[in-house]
Image (cartoon, coloured by chain):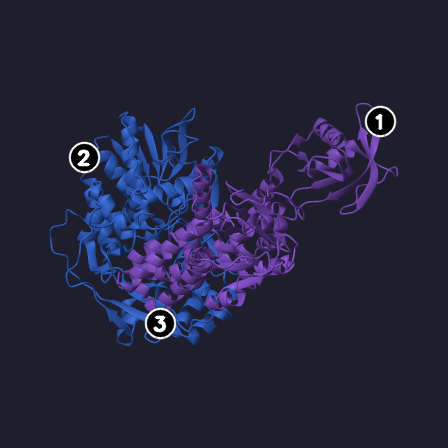
Chain colours: A blue, B purple
Amino acid sequence: MIDCDVLVIGAGHAGCEAAHAASKLGLETCLITADLNKIAQMPCNPAIGGLAKGHLVREIDALGGIMGFQADKTGIQFQLLNRSRGGAVQAPRAQSDKALYRKDMTKFLRSLPNLHLVQGMVTQILKNGNLACGVKIHTGEKLFGKAVILTPGTFLNGLIHIGLEHHSAGRDGEPASLELSENLDKMGLRLFRLKTGTPMRLHRDAIDWSLLKPQSGDQNPVPFSFRTKTRLENKILCFIGYTNAKTHEVIHNSLDKSPLFSGIITGIGPRYCPSIEDKVVKFPHHSRHQFFLEPEGLNTPEVYVNGLSSSLPLETQNLILKSIPGLELAKILRPAYGIEYDAVDSTLLSETLETYPIANLYLAGQINGTSGYEEAAAQGLMAGINAVLKIQRKKSLILGRSEAYIGVLLDDLISQGVEEPYRLFTSRAEHRLHLRIDNADK
Amino acid sequence: MQEDTIIAISTPLGYGGLGVVRLSGTDALSIAQQIFRPKRKKQTFPPRRALLGNIYDFSKNEIFEEAFLIFFPAPRTYTREDVIEISCHGSPVVLEEVVRLGIKAGARHSEPGEFTLRAYLNGRIDVLQAEAIHDIIHASSIKQAKISFHQLEGGLSKKLLSLREQIIDMLSQIEASLEFPREKLKISPKSITKSLDRAVQTVLNLVESYNLGKTLAEGLTLVLAGRPNVGKSTLFNALLERERSIVTPFPGTTRDYLQEKIHIKDSVFTLTDMAGLDKTTQPAEQEGIKKGKKLALEADGILLVLDASKTQTNEDILLINKFEGKKIILLFNKSDLHKKMNVELFKKGHPDLASLEISALTGKNISLLKDLMREKFVPSTGKSEEIILHLRQKLLLESIYSALKLGRNLLMDGYSEEIYVEEIRKAVPLIGELTGEILNDDILKEIFKSFCVGK
């Protein structure tokens, strides 16, 4: 039996920020993850930042969070987007070395004196009346704390779809969390299904790079973190390619094997991140769709195909690649897949991300219906800070919509709720012109 | 949907051939069944059929009053709820009794305007249409009623919805290019400018239609002006067809001004009779002249009355010059008497003014004058153009106009997208406020509907 102040469940981007914030503020913190080798894993694209997201990272950094600094440290290509436009809509974006990001974050978290890393699959939230007071893990062991921050990502009842086949999983190759969903449901946290997806990863050696258009980073990279003092270096190129009529024909011919179009997937997917079959069906007048080839790191052959997210069967995925110049011989290392998972109705949350039905229980990340590493990290940070403030009987830290993108994000979640995986956009902010990367620390 | 059932007398209070009591709500039918007995026993209440029967007082087990009942089942009703209409004789006591019985059977007396409020809350009409219903009921001319009917049919709403669509389409193009810079979505400032111009023009036309709308709603204001004792008050009475103004053979009888509404076919005029415009030492008359002059300068038109039985004077010419720029009809009055004024010469001197020889006393050419008044003063309403009738609508449209116009100017001055878009996007909630329809997330919805972006 372990006794802690704060228990953080899940070590993704939300969990890492929450655990870091809580321990940094001086409380004994326990970070519990199903796999200690997957801390700060990026299950989808190997990149951090972009419009609104880059703004979030700056704000996280200004509040003492770690995502920005780590992303600078492990980034391999940097771009400031919208350079030709005004300051309010410029935002940094970085390609990350996934493995390096994971390793470095793990090392950093291990170095924190108040933070304890525990491996275990949480099966139950322990309550004392309507107060959360701990968790039970798969071994039967119980951990107690004054606050529980839950960041399970896509693991709650995760169901991976590839073609008409599906299997239970939280992420590719990792078991889903089955018992916890039921437990949350019983506690009065309304659950609903969401869907997201990820494209295939290709082997870099089987791509004919000469047929694709290279894209380099900025000459003078702009860092995320106000603390980064070293000069950032671009170490890789990304490449741009296009689908074509043949690709679209292949996709049309296999729509009967699409779980999305055959109605097997019932969860709602994000509009801003449509699968390639979605794009082809919804935009029949487009003769081609752009995609990016993004290396997942310096020491891995894996290449992420940004733009070809899909839940079509593996053989169709191979046919799609075969139809694209430069990818005819491409080798799929990991297939694209769609995943359905449980999320909690975010209108059950207070502005500190504590749940109304169960006090001292905080939710952050995809469980609240959001999508994106940055959105998760921002919530984890705010949940971590506010859990500590509550334990210390201090006033909560609430950011307004006019003060920060974090304020916009949290307010949208708790007051509107979500119908599809929620992504932050600059246009969601009424005060867009005032929320800038160069004043995020003011 | 509201939970309770409301009841009210829907026809004006007073004695009349018919009076209608209306019920709306989920229990409308069951309440009606308690207070109404069909003539033919065991008859059901068929939808949308007039059913003959009696009002039934269930506490006394007695029937009184013969009435027709019509049952309109939801949702194809005024309120989108079950609606019952009971037509009785137009007797206030009978109608009050029906309402009393309805309340006893479980209904609640409606608040003022509550039937229309429910129609709005249940999504059957928007705010503009609710305003139109009010306007039809209170229309002062058939022309105004027709404009309101067009608005009720959704003419104005449709126009504003298509304006909103146009703006959202524009915004989504710009926002998509801002949010997804890696996708390299191209936007053409030229096409945005063109679209903005179109939107600005649409809004401007609506704003400008307000003056016309106001005229139609409130009537045109006309002032009878002229020197003392030229017969203004006699003409005033002749146009009103009653003895409203005191008339004597002496100049300066009218001191203060008088205002009355007159209807000429489908148009309404507010007619002002005022003291003769002349030098006077009489303080009350002076004050009357001062007010009259002010009214004349603000009026939509002037009936300038001259005494044709007298030779013309410089004062007559001065008066015409004083109202330069206003719409004037020159009236040569007292044309039943011996003409001393050289009317033809006078007309030649003012070829741009409409004129007519009349006699207010005998009624000569008064009906011709009425035609001329409509022809000269009533602005044409055009064909299908929407006309706004409310200050609320006008103020909101002006704000929309300023937002779009400022956005356009910033765009022309070369500002970056996020700057000018800040102004343009203000227009969207304003249109929502105008129609009463607030939709969130419109722009993002459009982005994802019409662009394929994302990883």
Q: Left or right: where does residue A295 sit relative to residue B69?
A: left
Same-subunit check for callouts 3 and 1? no
Q: Left or right: where does residue A343 sit relative to residue B153?
A: left
In the image, is residue B351 above or below residue A348? below
Total marks drawn?
A: 3
Q: Quadrant of the N terminus of chain A?
A: top left
Which callout, 2 or 3, points at the residue further toward the start of the chain? 2
Is any atom of residue B342 visible in this view? Answer: yes
- The numbered disc on residue A113 is 2
Around disc 1, counting alpha carbons within 10 Å, would you say few (fewer than 14), some (14 to 19), or many (20 or more)? few
Around disc 2, counting alpha carbons within 10 Å, would you say few (fewer than 14), some (14 to 19), or many (20 or more)? few
A100 or A60: nearer the eye?
Answer: A60
Q: Which secondary structure lies at badge 1?
A: strand
B256 or B70: nearer the eye?
Answer: B256
The percent position of residue A370, horizontal first and vertical second, equals 38, 47
- The answer to whether the residues at label 2 and label 1 have Cβ atoms under 8 Å apart is no
The percent position of residue A383, horizontal first and vertical second, equals 31, 37
Mark in front: 2 vs 3: 3
Q: Give the amino acid type for the residue marked by disc 1 in the picture.
A: Glu
> Residue tagged by mark 3?
A242
Q: Give the amino acid type for the residue marked by disc 3 in the picture.
A: Tyr
Q: CA distance from mark 2 to mark 1?
A: 88 Å
The percent position of residue B169, horizontal first and vertical second, equals 42, 61
B177 or A271: nearer the eye?
Answer: B177
Q: CA distance from mark 2 to mark 3?
A: 49 Å
